[in-house]
Amino acid sequence: FRSGGALLPPLQPTLAMADPQLLAALDLMRRMPPSRCETSLEELVDLVPHLTDDLLNTIDQPLQTAKDAQGNAYLLCDYNRDGDSYRSPWTNEYDPPLSDGVLPSPKLRAMETLANDIFEGYREMYYEGGISSVYFWDLDESSFAACVLVKKDAEEKKKLEAGNWDAIHVVEVRPLGPKRAAYKLTTTIMLRIKTGHAVGVHEGEMNLSGSLTRQKEEELAVGDVASHVANMGRMVEEMENRMRDTLQSIYFGKTKSVVNGLYQSGGAEANKKKDMLAQALMAEMGKRNAD
């Protein structure tokens, strides 16, 4: 869980050697706070406008929302963008309108429509709210890819002032034969939390933000169009559950342990007495068990 900078995918060696400015820009983004990712990206684009497309394609940003002409909410990303327009997965139309915008083939559009309906149910079951969007596109004559997006903003309550969860799942699908396909899933989770914190009469706030990326590859059996969506859905579900557990048990647990080591609310002396009492109790219980 990277709380010190924006998470970026590894650079291709040829790309890094061909454009040192892009390499320097991405290296700089790794050192910027994730909480100001959008601002840092805007400033980089102003400095090197000729790298705008490369930066937007490479740097993961918090998901933005929009509504199409029918009032359906959908998520914006580089996978549904064509120029300055974005395609709605519900109407398959661009906003602002484009006469020559890139659209999925009829077969992929059918899978896209099915996947949006399925992941809408998945979102309601796991997130109990938020927004989801799924986009499909062709890679070549036989292979295709899909992007599953989920965004959930936390409701302000008690000491929680703001918080959001952005999940970006990109799946590449390559056929291995008539009834088998290889799936490559790359998942990025971006998390932001802002809480109020008060000690006595002193008030303050805590900001925690970062991103985590994991990758998984599988070869699975396929039949009709729906089987592709089912395979991708199962992989996304397993990956999200695993990453949620990782964030909860490892990263938040480690953060809590570090904070408790730096600051002990009861005082070091009180904690020392508690440890001594616990050791004495364990020693006494050991003696009784021995008897």
Image (cartoon, rainbow, N blue to C red):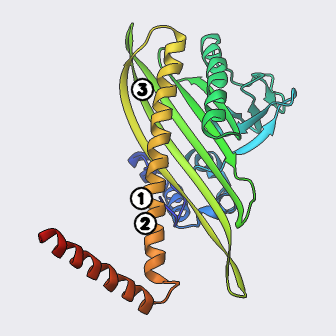
Q: In the displayed image of the protein, which residue is found farthest to the front?
A: 291
Q: In the displayed image of the protein, which residue is found farthest to the bottom?
A: 269
- The mark found on residue 183 in the picture is 3
In this picture, residue 240 sits left or right of residue 60: left
Label 1 near label 2: C-beta < 8 Å?
yes
Please state, as top left, top right, bottom left or bottom right, where the C terminus lies in the image. Answer: bottom left
Residue 26 percent coordinates (x, y)? 52, 58
Compare marks 2 and 3 and give the one earlier in the sequence.
3
- Total numbered badges shown on the rendered structure: 3
Residue position for label 2: 254
Q: Nearer the viewer, residue 64 or 247?
A: 247
Tell me if residue 161 comes above or below residue 57 in the rendering: below
Res. 74 in view: yes
Residue 33 is drawn in which quadrant?
Answer: bottom right
Q: Amino acid at mark 1?
A: Ile
Q: Nearer the viewer, mark 3 or mark 1?
A: 1
Q: Secondary structure at mark 2?
A: helix
Residue 122 percent coordinates (x, y)? 61, 30
- The mark found on residue 250 in the picture is 1
| Residue at 22% across, 78% down | 284
In this picture, residue 284 sits left or right of residue 57: left
